[in-house]
Image (spheres, rainbow, N blue to C red):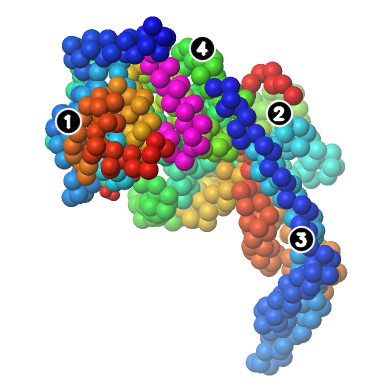
Amino acid sequence: MSVAGINVLVDETRARMAQAQAPLLSVRNVSAYYGSIRALKGVDIDVNEGEIVALIGANGAGKSTLMMTIFGQPQAREGTITFAGQDITRLPTHEIARLNLAQSPEGRRIFSRMTVRENLQMGAAVNGGRHFAEDLERMCTLFPRLKERIDQRGGTMSGGEQQMLAIARALMSRPRLLMLDEPSLGLAPLVVKQIFSTVRELNRTEGLTVFIVEQNAYHALKLAHRGYVMVTGAVTMSGTGQALLDDPQVKAAYLEGGQH
Amino acid sequence: MAQGSTIGQVAPTVAPRSTAALPALLKDAALFALVTLGLAIPVVAYRTDLGQGTGLVLTGRWGLVASLCLAIFVLRLAQRLVLAEVSRRRDARILAGVAAPPVAVRPARILGPLTLAIALTLPFLAAFGSGGLSEGRYWIDLGILILTYVMLGWGLNIVVGLAGLLDLGYVAFYAVGAYSYALLSTVFGLSFWICLPLSGLFAAAFGILLGFPVLRLRGDYLAIVTLAFGEIIRLVLINWTDFSGGSAGVSSIPRVNFFGVPFAAGEGGFAALFGLSFNPMHRVVFLYYLILVLALITNLVTLRMRRLPLGRAWEALREDEIACRSLGIDTTITKLTAFALGAMFAGFAGSFFAVRQGFVSPESFNFLESAIILAIVVLGGMGSQIGVAIAAIAMVGAPELLRNLGFLRAVFGEGFDPNEYRLLLFGLAMVGMMVWRPRGLISERTPSVRLAGRKS
Ligand SMILES: Nc1ncnc2c1ncn2[C@@H]1O[C@H](COP(=O)(O)OP(=O)(O)OP(=O)(O)O)[C@@H](O)[C@H]1O
Ligand SMILES: [Mg+2]
């Protein structure tokens, strides 16, 4: 049996085992509003420990809103969100961020006048900078490009480098759940591949749970164990990554134009 | 992942020398001079003086107009020739994606120690330069004034430069500090050394008081509310006569003493204690060193804070508030501490102001003061410590210097009072700054951490 084959087996076993326990993150019947506009309409999503879960959907479907709602900004008006058994629906954003879940937000939101190292220090703020040196070393191994540019200002880095920095910054808090909003946005295919393979590696070697929002449906579903499809604020479809990739509706709506 | 390292490594080609030919430059400068002429004719060319009877007499000042046009012509030419080249090089460097090389170019390296050395020895320099302590008083007083603004600039820099919260009412905290000492000492007879920390605490409390309602505001909205806050404090001080003495202010505030020893002639005074002959200048020199120490404390605290998580959180807050929150930073605490700490230093400076003047009144704390302090921070380069110090010297010292520029009379004729042109020159300097150094005198932000052993 090839290494890849064993990996698939490991993944499947892990996914099955995880499903037996309570999910790490569970979003139940959540609705969120911008003023009177209902951006999320009773969303249900589960992310199990050790899984990579992808959320795909058209522009304006509410994917980023869901990610931000999990982070309490805007807060869910209806429904509940639990993380690791704790109800986080009403917690303020900064307290949620201290609970072993981290995000790389839409648009990266790098601190542009601060250096790469300072950005990473901000990522480590929740654990008070303990094991900072060790984690910094780890990020430099994961993203060698960051090591080269450790004292460069965040804002002067290229888009791909900034994305790596955003992910690394999120990882500095040693999260159990990493949430990524469109990490492939505006990046060259090669860089996208690189970033996705890093994410897969983290999942395999360290059991990091990943929730990823993507426009790039093909790559995201290839990467993910399971996926959800969101249309105008509601989840319309879910299944394993492969099943969604093979689904004719998903194919027609999100994979048109070949395999990117 | 190895293949990734080749991406984006191609060095961008630096734009070729784009300085235009000399005739074009001359034409451009001439155009500027022409515009100046047009502007100068209605504004500068004629002066009206009271004549013998009731009528006004027009005096032509064409020499002045000609000098102005010439000055603009030369300045414009200089800008195009020299400064364009400088900024082109800087742009090229930015294009190449490298931070400014950490070589001797970094002005803070030399300027900082130099400024500090001058500041430490100023009373002696003044005494030797003018031939005696009393003769050097003018320079020491000027030094005290400048240092007060340096301290205020550094204090406001925490709020505006680091945390990015635009505060137009900073002078309110200065006022709180000044009145704290003025009232505590005159009403309760407390000594300056007890009141100094208390003033800081009161001002910090007011900082938090202001901070709470404006937590959710940013930018223009924040600026307007803080502006109003500054005015409220001033108006309360004017109108609450029973408490603050109204617009008459508080007078006969006790003078500073040397940690309990008064600066007085005779037995038990400072001079007698140290076996010196009595000189009223001792008190002034002591005040100078007091404000120098206070300012340096402000600077050291700021520098230290920048290396601490809280200080880094301030800077991150300035960059992106949403990202801050999602990294677990409590933005409420972060903002309030910035307001409180900034206000505290203004409070210290305020109580120093009160003990130095021996008199405070609301008119010392009007909006113009806030504007000057803010201008110092902005001109200094928003976050650069040495930049703020230099800007304070320029903003406070330059008008003083102008007072003494007698030789200009030789150029512009008798009756020319340089003082009348202070604000004009001030405005010109501001415009010049915005053209040539739009991000402040020292715009380079020094990282709070750096790799110890950098290669290359
Ligand atoms: N701050 C806001 N105020 C008002 N409406 C908003 C706000 N943010 C998002 N919306 C609206 O909510 C809806 C969902 O937006 P959201 O950003 O979640 O979409 P998305 O699925 O992430 O899209 P994309 O793939 O383009 O990023 C959109 O109709 C958008 O206009
Ligand atoms: Mg989005």
| Separation of residues labelled 4 and 2 (CA atoms) | 59 Å
Read off the chain for label 4: A
Which amino acid, by three-letter code, is at mark 2?
Answer: Ala
Callout 4 touching callout 2 (CB < 8 Å):
no
Give coordinates of residue A161: x percent, y percent.
53, 32
Which amino acid, by three-letter code, is at mark 4?
Answer: Glu
| Circle nearer the viewer, 4 or 2 | 4
Tell me where the magenta segment starts and ends, as one range.
A183-206
| Circle nearer the viewer, 3 or 2 | 3
Which comes before the other along the chain, label 3 or label 2?
A: 3
| Circle nearer the viewer, 3 or 4 | 4
Res A99 quadrant in image: top left
Q: Which residue is mark 3?
A: B80
Q: Which residue is mark 2?
A: B271
Give coordinates of residue B172: x percent, y percent.
44, 47
| Separation of residues labelled 1 and 3 (CA atoms) | 63 Å
